[in-house]
């Protein structure tokens, strides 16, 4: 009788080795290698000959296609991030820091679909059914006919889902707590997470059930477990935010059925997560209009224009190497903007500590924020207050040239809707013919410095 082969798998990257070692040779993590047995005794499939496979029918690209009717929850933010609703048979992976509100969001989604007379099953491996009911009572969702279970066995979960009509939505919270008897390993290990995900996704594809898997997040901000799980699912959503801000951002980083980089904005309240249909007004609601070093950036998050305040503080440094601290933006991008300001515009910041912050907890990932960051920095250094009715956007090149950015018309339209009268942006930003927003055209970063030195208006 053949002996079962034992593998040693890294829990950080999923690399398999033939023997144990203290350090993973692939990712460099220490004490992350765990012994795993791929299959339990008696579950190994008999080996077949090379001619035992069945012939698969091949089809052409111009064949008939069925129109997919998406499953919409009626909650606008998550429906938009998912691409207009959930595609039947799709699998989604939702990740976020502990306590950020993942379970709260998903129980609200489950209740909204259950109220539409869809069968919805919510399975928790971390909480008892009584705990889920307490959360539902606090959120006012007890009237929704959501079917609950507290279970971690994949075989038991799939057997339960197979009873009766297929569920339209199934939530598994969380995938790291699940285990399957086909693997001789502890729950949360790479093998268990991969095998459990495969079984759930296979069920979703064969029955048309939309499967939402909740994933834990490591200290580096990545979804724990093997990266192959992110490749197996159809969409990966990150729920971002921190306890210091009441705002939460649901961001799509992968979506086979919709746009990526789309966001949904929520506000954490005592009654759960409240959707924020107009995040620009929320992010700008408490801004200080009389302080230097603040600029309003007209940004884009997916297809949604968002106006957010960028704050800068510049102070003389007593250190040999001045501090450079940034929250909500790329550290390397800030260093580049500081270098261009000093080398191309003569703005001396090498002897100052620089602090940059994106108000509201939003994280900006586009280079169009260069002009807004530069305006806030020059304003903070000079003490000159920027005009309260102006927004800023544009990319800065290493030569100091201001480069145009995409979707300028949408940025200008959002600024006009919120009452802004001027947009300091690249010269060829264009915009609508009937727009009331005046375009303060820039071709070089020195134009921006001159505007601020003259009081924020053209000379």
Image (cartoon, rainbow, N blue to C red):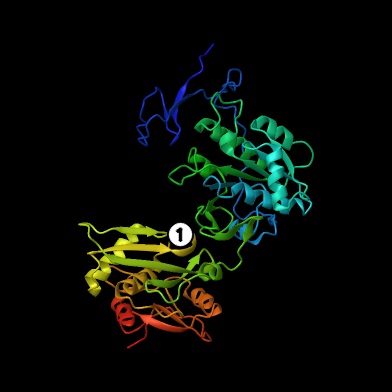
Mark 1 burial class by Cα count in 10 Å: few <14, some 14-19, many 20+: some
Q: Depth check: 372 or 85 in front? A: 372
Residue at 23% from the left image edge and 64% from the top image edge: 350
Q: Is residue 443 above or below residue 206?
A: below
Q: Secondary structure at mark 1?
A: loop
Left of 149 or right of it: where is 363? left
Is residue 361 shown left or right of residue 140?
Answer: left
Q: Which residue lies at the image location 22% right of the left edge and 57% below the top edge? A: 319
Question: Is residue 134 placed above or below 196 in the rendered structure?
Answer: below
Please indicate whether residue 30 sits to the left or right of residue 342 in the image: right
Which residue reaches farthest top? 1
Quadrant holding the N terminus: top right
Residue 440 drawn above or below residue 153:
below
Given residues 437 and 403, the one toward you in this image is 437
**Image location of residue 204, percent across then percent down:** 66, 42
Count of picture labels: 1
Circle 1 residue: 363
Specify the quadrant of the image occupied by residue 369.
bottom left
Q: Quadrant of the C terminus?
A: bottom left
Q: Which residue occupies 50% across, 43% down?
A: 217
Question: Residue 295's quadrant in the figure?
Answer: bottom left
- Residue 305 drawn at (x, y percent): 52, 69
Residue 60 seen: yes
Q: Position of residue 215 (x, y in %)?
A: 55, 42
Q: Nearer the viewer, residue 333 or 260?
A: 333
Residue 208 visible, this orientation: no
Going by the image, does 331 lie left or right of 8? Answer: left
**Residue furthest left in the image:** 320
Percent x, y of residue 90: 63, 48
């Amino acid at each position: 009788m053949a002996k079962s082969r034992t593998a040693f798998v890294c829990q950080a990257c999923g690399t398999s080795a033939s023997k144990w070692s203290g350090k993973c040779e692939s990712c460099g993590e220490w004490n992350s290698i765990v012994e795993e047995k791929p299959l339990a005794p008696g579950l190994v499939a008999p080996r077949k000959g090379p001619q035992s496979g069945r012939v698969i029918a091949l089809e052409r690209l111009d064949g008939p296609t069925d129109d997919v009717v998406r499953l919409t929850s009626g909650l606008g933010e998550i429906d938009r991030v998912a691409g207009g609703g959930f595609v039947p048979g799709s699998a989604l992976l939702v990740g976020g820091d502990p306590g950020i509100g993942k379970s709260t969001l998903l129980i609200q989604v489950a209740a909204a679909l259950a109220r539409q007379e869809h069968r919805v099953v919510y399975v928790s491996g971390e909480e008892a059914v009584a705990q889920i009911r307490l959360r539902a009572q606090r959120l006012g969702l007890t009237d929704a006919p959501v079917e609950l279970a507290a279970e971690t066995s994949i075989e038991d979960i799939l057997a339960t889902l197979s009873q009766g009509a297929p569920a339209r939505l199934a939530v598994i919270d969380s995938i790291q707590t699940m285990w399957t008897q086909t693997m001789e390993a502890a729950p949360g290990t790479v093998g268990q997470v991969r095998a459990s995900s495969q079984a759930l996704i296979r069920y979703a594809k064969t029955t048309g059930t939309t499967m939402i898997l909740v994933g834990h997040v490591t200290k580096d901000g990545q979804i724990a477990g093997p990266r192959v799980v992110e490749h197996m699912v159809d969409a990966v959503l990150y729920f971002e935010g921190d306890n210091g801000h009441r705002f939460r951002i649901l961001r799509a980083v992968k979506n086979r059925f919709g746009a990526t980089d789309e966001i949904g904005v929520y506000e954490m309240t005592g009654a759960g997560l409240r959707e924020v249909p107009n995040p620009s007004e929320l992010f700008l609601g408490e801004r200080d209009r009389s302080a230097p070093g603040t600029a309003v950036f007209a940004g884009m998050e997916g297809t949604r224009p968002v106006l957010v305040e960028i704050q800068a503080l510049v102070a003389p440094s007593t250190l040999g190497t001045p501090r450079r601290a940034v929250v909500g933006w790329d550290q390397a991008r800030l260093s580049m903007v500081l270098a261009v300001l000093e080398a191309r515009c003569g703005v001396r910041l090498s002897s100052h500590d620089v602090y940059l912050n994106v108000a509201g907890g939003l994280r900006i990932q586009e280079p169009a924020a260069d002009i807004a960051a530069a305006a806030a920095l020059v304003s903070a250094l000079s003490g000159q207050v920027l005009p309260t009715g102006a927004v800023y956007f544009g990319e800065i090149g290493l030569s100091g040239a201001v480069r145009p950015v995409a979707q300028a018309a949408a940025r200008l339209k959002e600024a006009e809707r919120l009452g802004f009268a001027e947009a300091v942006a690249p010269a060829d930003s264009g915009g609508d013919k009937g727009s009331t927003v005046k375009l303060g055209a820039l071709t070089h970063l020195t134009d921006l410095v001159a505007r601020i030195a003259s009081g924020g208006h053209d000379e």
